Image (tube, grey):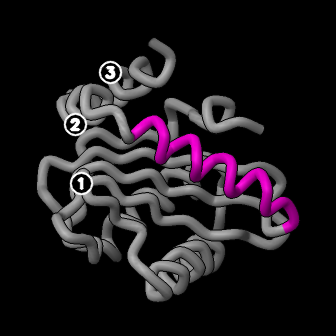
């Protein structure tokens, strides 16, 4: 599955309400959990996996983007949650983050995981794309940017 195939309008949150890195991850995991009918325990497990990975090294980039991610045992297909925050959130990088891509990928397919992360990094190397995504008012606006 490619990055664009993993994008789902129901997994985009604009604007986010989180005020911390933990809350940002929880908010994006909640999108996935609601769509897939996960239990509270399953939600907590995903948050823990992502935050454990984040403790190994921040996934914040220098342009205000963070790409928290985790490999999940038994996950059938990768998922990408996208969040745009009006508040800058300290995600451990040189500057606070306002754009978040949370990637959950099957642990059994590390190549797919790396390809999705690489696609996001490449896309976000465009200052124009980052500015347009930052100024999205709705999830529909954000979703459309990926396909223009």
- Name the residue at the left extreme: 87
Per the image, is 119 magenta? yes
Q: Which residues are magenta?
A: 108-124
Q: Nearer the viewer, mark 2 or mark 1?
A: 1
**Cα–Cα span, label 2 and label 1:** 10 Å
In the image, 107: left or right of 127? right
Quadrant placement of the C terminus: top left
Q: Is residue 99 shown left or right of residue 28? A: left
**Marks 3 and 2 close (CB-CB < 8 Å):** no
Q: Residue sitting at 43 percent across and 39 percent down?
A: 12
First reached walking from the N terminus: tag 3 or tag 2: 2
Sequence-earlier tag: 3 or 1: 1
| Magenta segment, prevailing SS (helix, strand or loop) | helix
Residue 122 is marked as: none
Residue that badge 3 annotates: 141
**Can you say whether 140 is above or below 109 in the image?**
above
Which mark is on residue 64? 1
Dot 3: few (<14), some (14–19), or many (≥20) neighbours within 10 Å?
A: some
Disc 2 designates what residue? Answer: 134
Is label 2 in a helix, a strand or a loop? Answer: helix
Q: Give the image quarter of residue 61.
A: bottom left
């Amino acid at each position: 599955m490619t990055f664009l195939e993993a994008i789902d309008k129901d997994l985009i949150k604009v604007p986010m309400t989180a005020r911390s890195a933990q809350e940002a991850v929880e908010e994006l995991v909640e999108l996935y959990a609601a769509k897939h009918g996960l239990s509270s325990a399953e939600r907590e497990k995903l948050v823990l996996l992502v935050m454990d990975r984040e403790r190994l090294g921040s996934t914040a980039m220098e342009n205000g983007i963070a790409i928290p991610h985790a490999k999940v045992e038994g996950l059938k297909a990768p998922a990408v949650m996208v969040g745009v925050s009006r508040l800058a959130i300290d995600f451990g990088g040189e500057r606070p983050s306002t754009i978040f891509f949370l990637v959950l990928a099957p642990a059994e397919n590390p190549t797919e995981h790396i390809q999705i992360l690489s696609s996001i990094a490449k896309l976000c190397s465009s200052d124009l794309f980052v500015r347009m995504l930052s100024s999205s008012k709705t999830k529909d606006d954000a979703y459309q940017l990926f396909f223009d």
